[in-house]
Amino acid sequence: MTRFLSTSLQAQEPFFRLGLQQLEAANGHPNTDIHLTMDVMHKSKRKLLELDLDPKDTTPEELFHALEVKVSIDDKRLSRTLQTLAATHVSAEADITAGLVHALNDLPDSKRCFAIKQSAMKSILKKMPPKKAMKRLGYRSIDSLLKNETVVTIMATSWLTEGTTWQQKLLDSYKKLRPSDFEVRNMTLTTLASKRWTTIAEDIVGRSKHTILPFKELGAVVILPLPQTAPKGTVMLSLTMALHQMNEIRACSSFLKLSQMRGDFGCVVKSIAVSEPVLTSSVLDRPVPWHLVQRYYARLNDRFHEAIFEPHMQLEDMIWTPIEQALSHIDPSLKFWEDSAHLGVMHNDKPVSLHVIDAALNYCNKIAFSERVTQYFQVALWHELLLGYLRHDYVEQSVFKELQPSLATELALA
């Protein structure tokens, strides 16, 4: 086992090392961990060359600052691209947010998802009127609000204006939902009226440095308008975070479809609204995120077993589009980021991440080299390692034991 993986993942030792030894022994010692390490090192060197850096003579700190420059340049390019899209397809105002929404809706991959019906969500909202949201939107009665505003707009407004008590009551109400309260439809990718939301958008962006509000149970991503005070790099970060949330919605959608026979289906809905579903596995040292299973079958269609997933789920439900691939589809000049999510260069037991979201977070928040963000790289690297082992029948069969749609009693939620 390579030290690079253990250090990059900040793994607990000796458990991580022992777990990999067991996986290697069970699968005939394929050296999956070593192959992944060599792949990361080789591809990271190629990315340095694309940045006009010498892999033999570039310090990790120099790479970190080069990535900041790269994000800065790409953010400006992306802003121009989105303004052009807005002016061409939306309105003459060339609003970046409108262009971002158009770009997301125009992506070629399927946006079908399993989400709460509008009627079911309205029934929930009618029983617990979001009074602060009603005031914000200018309504005196809940009936008038539900008649004139979309469910997504009401939810976005409520989530931002109501307190934690109301939010918790809403989540608790999900426990009564049934599969019949859901339907298959396209994701909702939308923005809110700019004039109405300028002030609140400035507050949100000031705290989170992006404008994205995801509602996985609704199959919706709401993009707040970009305020004048938005930090540099916010456009890049907002788009990549939106793409990330679209994948999260796809994964949660397939998990909910698979869970339709569970007696605690409503509890599952509540859980996925705030966290990602995971599986337990006797051969891996930590829970396996459900969206890793989603990625596995999206990448290896021929491994999909209809008998395990049907009748509730088919291969077309297993969609996962790499963020960087979608990014370069929107703007081909951003191709540099393709296949970089799991790449990094080690420095003093902490990597410099080449993941586009980490890089954008570092740039937007003006994070110092010593405090650099690496969380998205670590998740991507861990997933690449697990994907490598899932290709082996022994590990795949272990995970299959957790995929009994009619029972699903062992499925856990993080």
Image: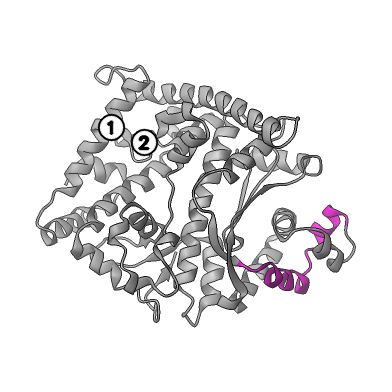
Q: Earlier in the sequence, mark 1 or mark 2?
A: 1
In the image, residue 132 lies in the stretch drawn in magenta: yes
Q: Main secondary structure of the magenta part?
A: helix
For the point 66% across and 32% down, which residue is it? 230
Tell me: 46 left or right of 157: left
Q: Which residue carries the number 2 mark?
A: 340
Q: Is residue 317 above or below residue 264?
A: above
Q: Which residue carries the number 1 mark?
A: 43
Mark 1 Cα-neighbour bin, 10 Å: few <14, some 14–19, many ≥20:
some
Do callouts 1 and 2 mark residues in contact (Cβ within 8 Å)? yes
Which is nearer the eye, 360 or 188?
Answer: 188
Tell me: 147 left or right of 157: right
User: Residue 50: in sight, yes or no?
Assistant: yes
The amino acid at mark 2 is Ser
For the point 33% across and 23% down, which residue is it? 48
The amino acid at mark 1 is Lys
Residue that protrudes farthest toward the right in the picture? 140
User: Would you identify the image quadrant in which residue 413 lies?
Assistant: bottom left
Tell me: 236 left or right of 311: right
Viewport quadrant of the C terminus: bottom left
x and y, in percent, of residue 314 in the image: 41, 66
Q: Which residues are magenta?
A: 116-138
